[in-house]
Amino acid sequence: MSLPEVQANSSEHIVRLEAAEYNPKPSLDALQNIKESWNSKAGAASYEQRTLECSRDIAKHLIFAAPQVAAGSRVLDNACGTGIVTSELLKTYTDLHIDAVDFSDGMMDVIRPMVQQQGWTDRVTIAKMNGMDLKLEDGIFDVSFTNFAIFFFPDPSKGVKELYRTLKPGGTAALSAWQYFGWLPVLHEIQRWVKPDDPPFAVPMLEKWHKKETMVETLKAGGFLGSKIRMSLQEVMYLDDNIEELAGSLTGLMEPMMKGVWDLEGLGGMRGALLRVLETQGDRFLVKKDGKVGLKLVAWLALATK
């Protein structure tokens, strides 16, 4: 099987799905599974392993795209998760203070010891906090980052209002959301075997966020002017050493989400089903880069200035 070699930034490989051909059906069971997985300590601890650092790659791009953080800046890492944005910021900037907040106990259990081990306690304040009700003063942040989280908020526009409120005049909110999952067509192939009559599976909540308008309108509803919003697409790769390793990594990502949604026992479980698709139809989905094999993912990057 010969796979195409791609560049990580090559926009011609970004896949856009036509609404007339694609009418997905989100699964509420999968939604609950996602929430339980990320909120648990074990799920939070394995977050980067399961995502093969794709979230970190996008965080790097988001930091690079945002206005340069000046010495002494105060930065919000909103819905900070395991501290990916915080750690990437402190690799680049030393003279700043970060408020890292999240509402998940599991994520708090990961970021707290990480900050202590890195010796960052003088530069990072950690707090459990609801992103829709930040217990923070008005106008205190130069930049805020919300990396792959705004779509999980029960009321995203309310979360954006909090970002707007806590930014200084001229400050910038930097956010990300997924536009395309390269593994979703692989799931659809598995679905053809186990649920052939069902509409295509969709990741709950995230389907509408594939559209640029969702992010733009949410930012506007939160107080940002349309003229002060900039959107761009960024492609990253979900890569592993070979197809077998890739199937294992994807299993770690998908198995918690699909628990109880499909019965895959006859296909050898999630890993067996994934391996069957990737080995027999990989030329339809897979790419290779730097000696590895994987799938393309695309994210929206949004910069909104107050």
Image: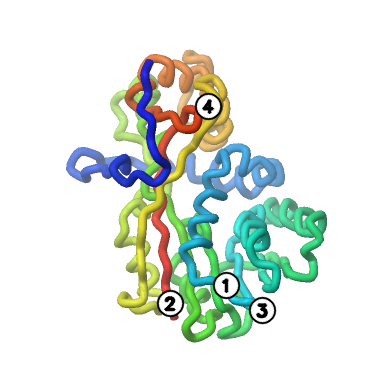
Q: Which of marks 1 and 2 is nearer the N terminus?
A: 1
Quarter of the image containing the N terminus? Answer: top left
Question: Which residue is label 2 attached to?
Answer: 305
Question: Which residue is label 4 attached to?
Answer: 246
Q: Mark 3 and 2 residues: CB-CB less than 8 Å, in contact? A: no
Quarter of the image containing the C terminus? Answer: bottom left
Colouring of the image: rainbow
Q: Earlier in the sequence, mark 2 or mark 4?
A: 4
Marks 1 and 2: which is nearer the front? 1
- Judged left or right of residue 135, residue 176 is left
Q: Mark 1 and 2 residues: CB-CB less than 8 Å, in contact? A: no
- Judged left or right of residue 208, residue 55 is right
Q: Which of marks 3 and 2 is nearer the N terminus?
A: 3
- Judged left or right of residue 139, residue 172 is left
The CA span between labels 1 and 4 is 36 Å
Residue 87 visible? The answer is yes
Q: Which amino acid does label 3 sit on?
A: Gly
Residue 246, percent across and down? 52, 26
The CA span between labels 1 and 2 is 14 Å
**Neighbourhood count class around disc 4 (C-alpha, 10 Å): few under 14, some 14–19, many 20 upward:** many
Q: Which amino acid does label 1 sit on?
A: Val
Q: Which of marks 1 and 4 is nearer the N terminus?
A: 1
State the SS at label 2.
strand
Q: Which amino acid does label 2 sit on?
A: Thr
Q: Of 127 and 37, which appears nearest the observer?
A: 127
Q: What residue type is labelled 4?
A: Leu
The CA span between labels 3 and 2 is 19 Å
Q: Of 40 and 271, which appears nearest the observer?
A: 271
Residue 214, percent across and down? 34, 61
**Neighbourhood count class around disc 1 (C-alpha, 10 Å): few under 14, some 14–19, many 20 upward:** some
Res. 72 mark: 3
Q: Mark 2 and 4 residues: CB-CB less than 8 Å, in contact? A: no
